[in-house]
Amino acid sequence: MHVLVTGGAGYIGSHTVLQLLQDGHEVTILDNFSNSSPEAVRRVNALSSSKAKLLKVDLLDEELLKETLTTVKPDAVIHFAGLKSVGESVSQPLKYYRNNVTGTLNLLDAMDSAQCHTLVFSSSATVYGESTALPLLERTPRSATNPYGRTKLHIEEMLEELGASDARWSIANLRYFNPVGAHESGAIGEDPQGIPNNLMPYVAQVAIGRRDKVGVFGGDYSTPDGTGVRDYIHVEDLAAGHLAALEYLKDSSGVHVWNLGTGTGASVLEVIEAFRRVSGQPVPYEIVERRPGDVAESYANPEKARLELGWKAERGLEQMVEDMWRWQEQNPRGFESGDLLELSDDELAEHLKPYLVTRKEDGPRGDID
Ligand code: NAD
Ligand code: UD1
């Protein structure tokens, strides 16, 4: 299948592109690099025997987007492109509505023009708002507590109405819980700009010595150790969920929704302790005020995805932290740092050879000399 991946240079997108290539798909990435670097795609291509094509396109450029889609003629689209900082969305809500909602509208129009009606959309567990009905089920009522969350909610609703209006559409809304971790090679991973908002990248930067200590947002929640509990999911498991959804959509029209989580929560202190164990570094922390808008606990019921997609998260917290730490150590300042950046394409491919993925029909994965 020819899959067009918006936001494919980003964190979750890059890991998914690699799995799509491995699965034998043809991949075209559209990205405007507002929160990513072409270096991520160079590394994905070095890790794979078949290569993804990369096009610099902004979803807000309606004309170019339409032209691109009608030229590429994809069979399906996986739509990661979006802005994702909750704090920034509160101070600049229109930027979020424009980029995420208008960007998605433009994409849907362009897909329709290109006769492509299969879409996998990156939604988020944020659509469960402040729900305390745990574990969270796909039918748990939705709400939004900030503009970022509301863009996800609006897009989900828009997609439901689109699916109801025209039976040609096959759509998956994937609600991610807390994506963390990195590819086992340490060559691709999350590269937050500025001070990380999310826990895991923050803890990783404390462990590497870039920041002094972790501020733990609240120590008096009604959780076993008083700190917030979340359902962390390895980005490789998450990526696999997209391939499973794509497969499902092949013979099923309409709009579908799946939680992508592990079903198990970990507390902030458990995450800090896992980083200490894995890195062997001290990870100082201090309990500070609760962060407004945070819930005490959030974790998925992932049963629907298991039953309908045959998908299940396989990796535990220890592996999430190990892989994240490898990425952090090898790229202390993300894609713009570390030894890999200095390598030519050929040298990079040689360096990553032990991790080379080959297309399914090309034979087994592995280090062929
Ligand atoms: P990311 O920022 O690493 O990737 C998003 C990519 O989209 C970036 O490469 C960015 O440059 C690109 N992009 C943004 N706006 C664009 C536009 N107008 N045109 C073209 N490209 C554009 O983020 P991620 O963590 O990989 O998240 C991917 C998706 O998953 C996002 O939609 C995000 O909201 C959603 N999501 C992420 C998380 C998470 O914790 N990472 C959780 C739930 C949902
Ligand atoms: C946050 C976003 C959510 C988004 C998700 C994934 C908010 C209110 N929610 O969720 O919309 O979908 O990221 O991108 O921003 N923590 C600390 N110290 C820190 C950072 C976090 O103690 O420096 C705690 C939080 O209070 C929480 C846990 O760690 O208990 C995880 O936080 P985070 O990684 O930001 O994810 P979410 O809060 O689940």
Image: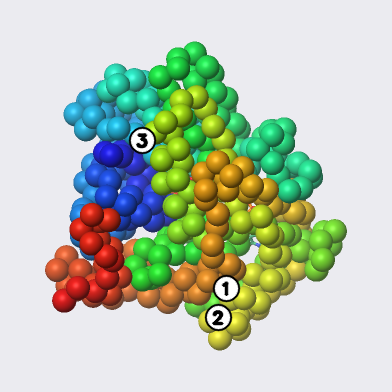
Cβ–Cβ under 8 Å for marks 1 and 3: no
Tell me which label, 2 or 3, sits earlier in the chain: 3
Residue type beneath disc 1: Glu
Image quadrant in which the N terminus is located:
top left
Secondary structure of residue under mark 2: helix
Left or right? Give the position of 240 relative to 357. Answer: right
* Mark 2 Cα-neighbour bin, 10 Å: few <14, some 14–19, many ≥20: some
Left or right? Give the position of 238 relative to 9. Answer: right
Residue type beneath disc 3: Val
331 up-or-down from 259: above or below: below
* Mark 3 Cα-neighbour bin, 10 Å: few <14, some 14–19, many ≥20: many
Secondary structure of residue under mark 3: strand
Question: From this viewpoint, which residue is outermost toward the bottom?
Answer: 280
Residue 91 appearing in the image: no
Q: Position of residue 245 (x, y in %)?
A: 46, 41
* Mark 1 Cα-neighbour bin, 10 Å: few <14, some 14–19, many ≥20: some
Cβ–Cβ under 8 Å for marks 2 and 1: yes
Secondary structure of residue under mark 1: helix
Q: CA distance from mark 2 to mark 1?
A: 8 Å
Name the residue rendered at 14%, 68% in the picture: 346
Answer with the quadrant where ligand 2 appears in the image.
bottom right
Residue type beneath disc 2: Val
Q: Which mark is residue 318?
A: 1
Q: Which mark is residue 175?
A: none
Q: Which mark is residue 278?
A: 2
Q: Position of residue 232 (x, y in %)?
A: 60, 59
Q: CA distance from mark 2 to mark 3?
A: 37 Å
- Circle 3 sits on which residue? 77
Name the residue rendered at 55%, 57% in the picture: 313
